[in-house]
Amino acid sequence: MREINGQINAAGMKFAVVVSRFNSFFTEQLLKGAMDCFVRHGGSDADLTVVRVPGANETPVVTAKLVAAGGYDAVIVLGAVIQGATPHAELINGTVARALAKIALDNSIPVLNGIVCAQNLEQAIERSGTKQGNKGWDATMAAIETVAVLRSI
């Protein structure tokens, strides 16, 4: 039996991180987590490009442009969408998730969805660096491993 596993070593990998400015109280914590994960696992600051966009809804088009431009092993998308009194958050979350998945599949490049989808502020806080961890860190860890797996295939 042959088994392929990805090593958690970001040395030599180049990542782009697309970060939503909307809900920056949360997204800046997600970005810190992503950057910390990348560097702690052997990545270099010089191999990390941060691109800021207005909101989560703008992340797919910018991600598609980054992927088309080439030069990145993965793109990590960070944002925070918090449910309000209308179904707007659900619409944004579903649309963005489908678009990011399509970009990844159409281009055979990891596009990690690190957008916090929360029902309330407490959940957003928990997923941005407290009890539930940091979704920016988690998305970056998944990107490192996925790139390593793809390189091994």
Image (cartoon, rainbow, N blue to C red):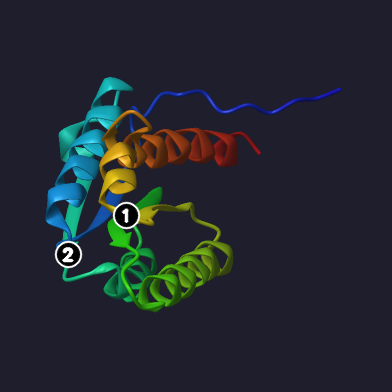
- Residue 73 x %, y %: 40, 48
Q: Which mark is residue 120?
A: 1
Q: Which residue is found at the position 49% from the left and 68% from the top? A: 103
Q: Which residue is found at the position 33% from the left and 74% from the top? A: 85
Q: Which of the two labelled residues, at mark 1 and mark 2, occupies the earlier sequence position? A: 2
* Residue kind at label 1, given as amino acid type: Asn
- When asked about the image quadrant of residue 70, the answer is bottom left
Q: Quadrant of the C terminus?
A: top right
Query: As rendered, which of 150 and 58 lies closer to the eye?
Result: 58
- Label 1 element class: loop
Q: Which residue is found at the position 25% from the left and 42% from the top? A: 125
- Residue 128 x %, y %: 27, 40
- When asked about the image quadrant of residue 91, the answer is bottom left
- Label 2 element class: loop
The answer to whether residue 72 is visible is no
Structural crowding at the residue carrying mark 2, measured as other residues with C-alpha within 10 Å and reported as few (<14), some (14–19) or many (≥20): some
- Residue 82 x %, y %: 31, 61
Query: In the image, 152: left or right of 55?
Result: right
- When asked about the image quadrant of residue 152, the answer is top right
Residue 150's place in the image compared with 20, above or below, is: above
Query: In the image, 69: left or right of 103?
Result: left
Residue 16's place in the image compared with 52, above or below, is: above
Q: Which mark is residue 22?
A: 2
Q: Residue furthest front?
A: 85
- Residue 69 x %, y %: 32, 67
Query: As rendered, which of 126 and 102 lies closer to the eye?
Result: 126
Structural crowding at the residue carrying mark 1, measured as other residues with C-alpha within 10 Å and reported as few (<14), some (14–19) or many (≥20): few
Q: Residue furthest right?
A: 1
Q: Which residue is found at the position 51% from the left and 62% from the top? A: 104
The answer to whether residue 34 is visible is yes
Query: As rendered, which of 148 and 31 lies closer to the eye?
Result: 31
* Residue kind at label 2, given as amino acid type: Phe
